[in-house]
Amino acid sequence: MGTGFISKNTRRSWILILTIVLNSLDGLFTLYEIKHGLATEFNPLMAWLLHLNLFIQFKFLVNIFIVFLYTQKQKMAQYGLNICFYVYFFICMYHISRLFVL
C-alpha cells in the first residue's frame, strides 16, 4: 500500500513538467512585458536573441535541454534539473509580482 510519499520518479517527473511550464511562462511573460514597454531583457544573451527574433527558438532549446537532464541518471544532472526548476520558479514569481505593481 501507499506510504503517503511521492516516489522519486514521480517527483522527478513533476519537476520536469513544472520546469518546462515555468520556462515557457517566463518566455511568454518576457515577450508580453517587452511588447508593451513594461520591461527590458536583463540577460544580454536573451536580449540579443530577442533582437534576432530567435528568443522563442532558444526557449524551446532550453526545454529540450531540461528533458535531456531528466533522462540522465547522474546526480549532477538531477541537481541541474532541480536548479533549473528553482531558477524558473523565482523568475516567474518575479514576473507575477510585477503584475501587481504595474
Image (spheres, helix red, strand yellow):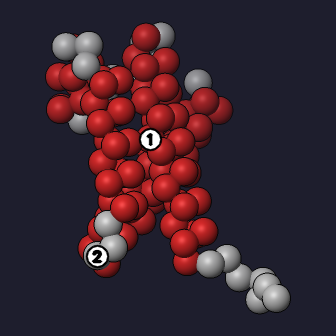
Residue designated by label 2 = 74
* Nearest-to-viewer mark from 1 and 2: 2
Q: Is residue 33 shown to the viewer in this render?
A: no
Marker disc for residue 14: none
Instruction: Give x and y (percent) for residue 85.
Output: 45, 57
Q: Quadrant of residue 23?
A: top left
Q: Is residue 59 above or below residue 82?
A: above
The quadrant the C terminus occupies is top right
| Left or right placement of residue 47 versus residue 32 in this view | left
Q: Amino acid at mark 1?
A: Asn
Q: Amino acid at mark 2?
A: Gln
Q: Is residue 35 above or below residue 95?
A: above
Q: Is residue 48 above or below residue 4?
A: above
**Structural distance between the alpha carbons of marks 1 and 2:** 23 Å
Q: Secondary structure at mark 2?
A: loop
Q: Secondary structure at mark 1?
A: helix
Instruction: Identify the residue at horizontal 77%, vertical 89% (top origin).
Output: 3
| Left or right placement of residue 51 versus residue 24 in this view | left
Q: Is residue 67 above or below residue 14?
A: above
The answer to which of 24 and 34 lies nearer the viewer is 24
The answer to which of 13 and 51 lies nearer the viewer is 13
